[in-house]
């Protein structure tokens, strides 16, 4: 879709004054800010998911080797944590991917409906993933079951038990949970950005996601305990907290994703990524963080962690990052190195020769094998007189 948006032109540049004999300059669709806002966060997410998938696969392989060889020290806490991480990630990433494919189809306009665009087949073949291997609305319960044990451990203050989480993805929850529990559930932290420029700092964005995740987890625990204390059965209390669990699982997944994106970039810096590539990857990470804070702003505002000024900074920051990523957008797509054979898309061709490819694909359609098409003689011809539809009246079937 990004490649097609770079090829497709629509509308004229009002800021450009054509010289004598020069045609009015048409705008690339990708230069419309709304199109960028639809597509660039998905581009950022694709790289974010890649780094997280790579790190998760490595962790699973290391755990498997340790268990098979019998030489490793893999604890139940670590196994449960990996299960919580993978469950939350599966629920969130497959939802984003499925919704993203449909958004890409919409962003291609009418051509997105073409079978030759590759998008209808991609969408229908992928759409099973939010359901199979764990339904995306059921998995958050498993995530919450694991994470609520952290809340209990921090509340009890057992340092030996807390230390078991040091190698876990959920270790980031310990510090903010400790602070919130000492403050009796109230948030004492504030967004650390002191200026609009600070919101492009990845450490600042990570702080925001960690705070949100810890607060929502503690809120879920508090709601369940309060409902049980008020006389509700545990099953009823658990059922009433399911929506909050879903939000808490999403928050946990986003925190892991951004953290893994940042650590993945740092690990590959000066190895497979040069200085310029590292800079571009960090811009994608910043966009990913800002975009999802913007989309779920209420989660950050409701406890006063963000204020109205921060909200405006974040919205403007998203636009700033779109502008920074624009020059490299097509190159970032090309860097994934998906061949035309795999894409099977007239719109996403590597060479950008879109319209001849659409015409070539249309000629392969059996409906276009004859001129006029099938059904014309039997049905359409008798309705057409000199190019005008012949009205014969309507009759009620009642």
Image (spheres, rainbow, N blue to C red):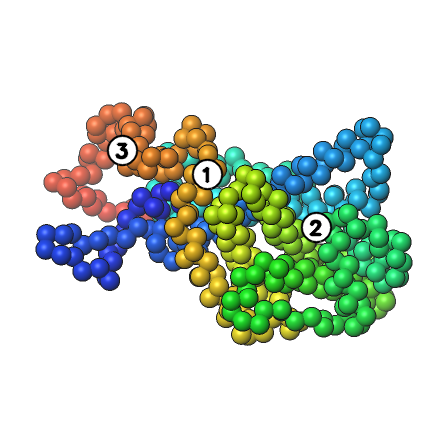
Residue displayed at 54% across by 39% down:
272
Count up the numbered dots: 3
Seen in the picture, residue 340 relative to 78 is either above or below; the reply is above
State the CA–CA distance, disc 2 to disc 3: 47 Å
Q: Position of residue 317 (x, y in %)?
A: 48, 64
Residue displayed at 50% across by 51% down:
279
Instruction: Give the mark nearest the N terminus, 3 or 1.
Output: 1
Q: Is residue 58 among the parts visible in the rendering?
A: yes
Q: Quadrant of the N terminus?
A: top left
Q: Secondary structure at mark 1?
A: loop
Q: Nearer the viewer, residue 293 or 387?
A: 293
Seen in the picture, residue 278 relative to 339 is either above or below; the reply is below
Identify residue for label 3. 356
Q: Nearer the viewer, residue 64 or 117?
A: 64
Q: Are marks 3 and 1 in contact (CB under 8 Å)?
A: no
Query: Closer to the observer: label 3 or label 1?
Result: 1
State the CA–CA distance, disc 3 to disc 1: 24 Å
Q: Are marks 2 and 3 in contact (CB under 8 Å)?
A: no
Tell me, for residue 335, which label it has, or none: 1
Identify residue for label 2. 140
Q: Quadrant of residue 307?
A: bottom right
On screen, residue 71 versus residue 11, left or right, reads right
Q: Secondary structure at mark 2?
A: helix
Instruction: Give the mark nearest the N terminus, 2 or 3.
Output: 2
Residue displayed at 38% across by 38% down:
348
On screen, residue 78 versus residue 382, left or right, reads right
Q: Residues within 10 Å of mark 1 (few under 14, many from 20)?
A: few
On screen, residue 57 versus residue 370, left or right, reads right
Q: Quadrant of residue 230?
A: bottom right
Q: Position of residue 239 (x, y in %)?
A: 75, 56
């Amino acid at each position: 879709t990004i490649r097609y948006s770079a090829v497709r032109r629509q509308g004229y540049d009002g800021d450009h004054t054509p010289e004598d004999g020069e045609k009015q300059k048409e705008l690339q669709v990708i230069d419309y800010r709304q199109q960028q806002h639809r597509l660039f966060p998905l581009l950022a997410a694709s790289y974010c998911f890649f780094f997280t998938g790579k790190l998760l696969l490595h962790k699973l392989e290391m755990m498997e080797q340790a268990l098979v060889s019998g030489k490793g020290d893999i604890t139940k806490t670590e196994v449960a944590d990996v299960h919580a991480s993978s469950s939350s990630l599966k629920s969130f990433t497959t939802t984003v991917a499925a919704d993203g494919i449909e958004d890409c189809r919409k962003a291609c306009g009418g051509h997105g409906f073409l079978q030759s665009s590759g998008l209808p087949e991609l969408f229908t073949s992928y759409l099973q993933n939010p359901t199979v291997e764990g339904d995306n609305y059921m998995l958050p319960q498993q995530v919450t079951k694991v994470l609520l044990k952290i809340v209990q451990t921090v509340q009890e203050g057992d340092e030996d038990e807390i230390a078991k989480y040091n190698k876990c993805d959920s270790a980031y929850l310990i510090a903010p949970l400790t602070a919130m529990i000492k403050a009796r559930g109230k948030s004492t932290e504030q967004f650390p950005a002191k200026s609009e420029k600070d919101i492009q700092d990845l450490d600042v964005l990570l702080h925001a996601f960690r705070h949100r995740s810890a607060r929502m987890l503690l809120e879920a625990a508090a709601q369940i305990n309060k409902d049980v204390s008020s006389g509700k059965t545990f099953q009823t209390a658990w059922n009433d907290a399911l929506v909050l669990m879903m939000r808490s699982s999403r928050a946990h997944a986003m925190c892991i994703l951004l953290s893994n994106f940042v650590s993945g970039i740092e690990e590959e810096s000066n190895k497979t990524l040069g200085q310029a590539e590292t800079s571009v990857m960090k811009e994608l990470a910043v966009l990913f963080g800002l975009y999802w804070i913007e989309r779920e702003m209420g989660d950050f505002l409701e406890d006063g962690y963000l204020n109205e000024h921060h909200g405006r900074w974040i919205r403007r920051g998203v636009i700033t990052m779109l502008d920074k990523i624009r020059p490299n957008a097509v190159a970032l797509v090309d860097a994934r190195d998906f061949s035309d054979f795999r894409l099977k898309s007239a719109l996403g061709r590597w060479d950008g020769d879109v319209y001849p490819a659409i015409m070539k694909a249309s000629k392969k359609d059996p409906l276009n094998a004859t001129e006029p098409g099938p059904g014309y003689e039997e049905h359409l011809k008798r309705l057409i007189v000199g190019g005008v539809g012949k009205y014969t009246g309507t009759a009620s079937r009642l």
